[in-house]
Image (cartoon, rainbow, N blue to C red):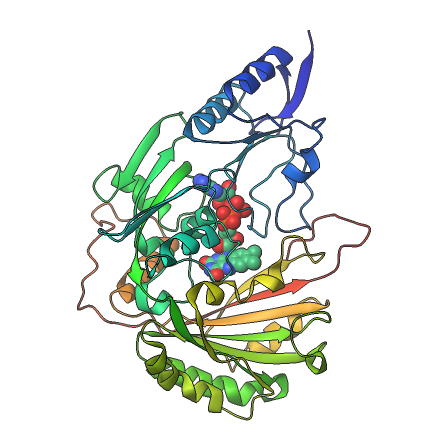
């Protein structure tokens, strides 16, 4: 009898009868990927090239039945499981060594209900998929700021994008989801059905089940939006970030801004004289008419003399793809990230920037988290839930439209990269 080696949830080695593997392969709508499959190396690769894991099996799911099959198989053999959406997770949670990868990336269907302003995205869709469909109707879902990021991991982690201040976090806009649970059932969850599981999906991470589709509320923005993008010398960061902070605290809810410390890599689309320079990029957009947006955003461009000004009226889809070239999947750079909470961008920023590993590309993104009503309340609720278990009496709804206690915190994320050379061992920061 031929057997097949894999690893269990408790990290023990296990042998699976080859006939069980063949049976699984027969039940799936797409070829099962095994270590000796010609496309194994392509199928196991995730976005962060520092991650180099070798799963025993990769199930590329074409639909819900494939997900159910994979979960039941994993359960029967007590296998270590990793679920893959857009595969952008920097720590490489979308893959594993020796276990089974349940890969939803072929499931990228999008369905829009224009009248009800709702969109349903399958569990392997990217934000680019969603934007393309929703913008055909001048509507947006609140996703991330890089279009290749997966809808699934971003939403399950909370998710914030350009319009976070205006419309809240991605999970605030989640209306319902279809989930395959660990016991192999398909549940439709919402505020009114399996509400505890729904609550957990809204920012609780990827461990509560496999979400096969997400339903989001849509908002009217686009097709053209105002974008402000002045670039300042990094030497002036301290003064400009002070002005940026004051601007962000007083700006109306429709204005959304980021400040990014960035080292511009050679060969990028930036003008050549900026290659290799460290800069401060201020970026802003407005959820409304572009002309009015430019009026509100003008102060960002007048903090000092910009060395480059990328401001323009651009299509919403272009705004969503502005940063894509820095994070191209096919590029040869790798990513390490450090998350930090920064009480004031002018105090600890220097240390954070200095601590980022050196490489041809390094970036620090600061995002204002002063939420617009009613999102201030839901953000506070989320912080409470991160601090401890949910009180039994609390519910996941109850966001009052007149509650307005803006959070004045900032969040920062350092991204650094280095070229892939000989060693491909993961170095997670
Ligand atoms: C270039 C880049 C840009 C980013 N920009 C933003 C941004 O603008 N805003 C923001 O909030 N975050 C952003 N992020 C962070 C991003 O949200 C997370 O990395 C997120 O985990 C990516 O989701 P994914 O589906 O692509 O990832 P994956 O690596 O596929 O999955 C991430 C986690 O979710 C689980 N998971 C995946 N699919 C499912 C599913 N269908 N059901 C259940 N669990 C699942 C995985 O097992 C894993 O634990 C960015 C990351 C990168 C690398």
For the point 59% across and 39% down, the residue is 95
Residue 413 vertical position relative to residue 226 in the rendered view, above or below: above
For the point 30% across and 74% down, the residue is 253
Residue furthest to the front: 136
Q: Quadrant of residue 41?
A: top right
Residue 213 vertical position relative to residue 291 in the rendered view, above or below: above
Q: Quadrant of the C terminus?
A: bottom right
Foreground residue, 147 or 334? 147
Residue furthest to the right: 422
For the point 43% across and 63% down, the residue is 161
Q: Is residue 290 visible?
A: yes
Measuring from the top left, give residue 403's x and y in whole percent. 20, 68
Measuring from the top left, give residue 30's x and y in whole percent. 55, 27
Q: Is residue 46 left or right of residue 379?
A: right
Measuring from the top left, give residue 353's x and y in whole percent. 62, 74
Foreground residue, 381 or 202? 202
Q: Is residue 353 left or right of residue 78?
A: right
Q: Is residue 303 left or right of residue 141?
A: right
For the point 28% across and 41% down, the residue is 196
Residue 31 vertical position relative to residue 291 in the rendered view, above or below: above
Residue 79 vertical position relative to residue 166 in the rendered view, above or below: above
Measuring from the top left, give residue 315's x and y in whole percent. 44, 68
Q: Quadrant of the N terminus?
A: top right
Foreground residue, 350 or 222? 222
Total tally of numbered discs in the picture: 0
Q: Is residue 141 visible?
A: no
């Amino acid at each position: 009898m031929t057997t097949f080696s894999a690893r269990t949830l408790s990290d023990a080695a296990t042998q699976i009868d080859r006939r069980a593997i063949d049976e699984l392969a027969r039940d799936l709508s797409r070829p099962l990927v095994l270590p000796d499959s010609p496309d194994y190396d392509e199928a196991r690769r995730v976005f962060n090239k520092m991650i180099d894991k070798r799963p025993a099996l990769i199930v590329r799911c074409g639909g819900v039945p494939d997900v159910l099959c994979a979960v039941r198989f994993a359960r029967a053999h007590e296998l270590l499981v990793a679920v893959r959406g857009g595969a952008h997770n920097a720590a490489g949670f979308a893959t594993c060594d020796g276990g089974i990868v349940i890969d939803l990336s072929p499931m990228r269907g999008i369905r829009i209900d224009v009248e009800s302003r709702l969109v349903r995205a399958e569990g392997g869709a990217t934000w680019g998929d969603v934007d393309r469909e929703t913008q055909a109707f001048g509507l947006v879902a609140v996703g991330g700021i890089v279009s290749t990021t997966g809808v699934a991991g971003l939403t399950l982690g909370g998710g914030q994008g350009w319009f976070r201040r205006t419309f809240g976090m991605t999970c605030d806009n989640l209306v319902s989801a279809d989930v395959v649970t660990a016991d192999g059932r398909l549940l439709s969850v919402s505020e009114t059905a399996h509400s505890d599981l729904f609550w957990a999906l809204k920012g609780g991470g990827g461990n509560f089940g496999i979400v096969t589709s997400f339903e989001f509320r849509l908002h009217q923005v686009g097709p053209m939006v105002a974008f402000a993008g002045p670039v300042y010398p990094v030497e002036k960061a301290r003064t400009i970030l002070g002005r940026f902070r004051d601007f962000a605290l007083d700006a109306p809810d429709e204005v959304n801004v980021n400040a990014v410390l960035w080292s511009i890599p050679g060969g990028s689309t930036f003008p050549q004289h900026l290659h290799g320079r460290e800069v401060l990029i201020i970026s802003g957009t407005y959820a409304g008419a572009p002309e009015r947006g430019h009026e509100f955003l003008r102060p960002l461009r007048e903090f000092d003399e910009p060395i480059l000004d990328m401001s323009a009226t651009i299509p919403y889809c272009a705004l969503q793809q502005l940063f894509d070239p820095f994070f191209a999947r096919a590029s040869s750079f790798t990513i390490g990230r450090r998350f930090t909470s920064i009480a004031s961008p002018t105090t600890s920023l220097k240390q954070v920037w200095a601590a980022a590993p050196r490489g041809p590309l390094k970036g620090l993104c600061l995002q204002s988290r002063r939420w617009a009503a009613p999102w201030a309340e839901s953000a506070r609720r989320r912080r409470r839930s991160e601090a401890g278990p949910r009180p039994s009496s609390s519910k996941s709804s109850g966001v009052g439209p007149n509650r307005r206690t803006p959070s004045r915190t900032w969040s920062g994320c350092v991204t650094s990269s280095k070229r892939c050379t000989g060693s491909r061992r993961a170095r997670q920061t």
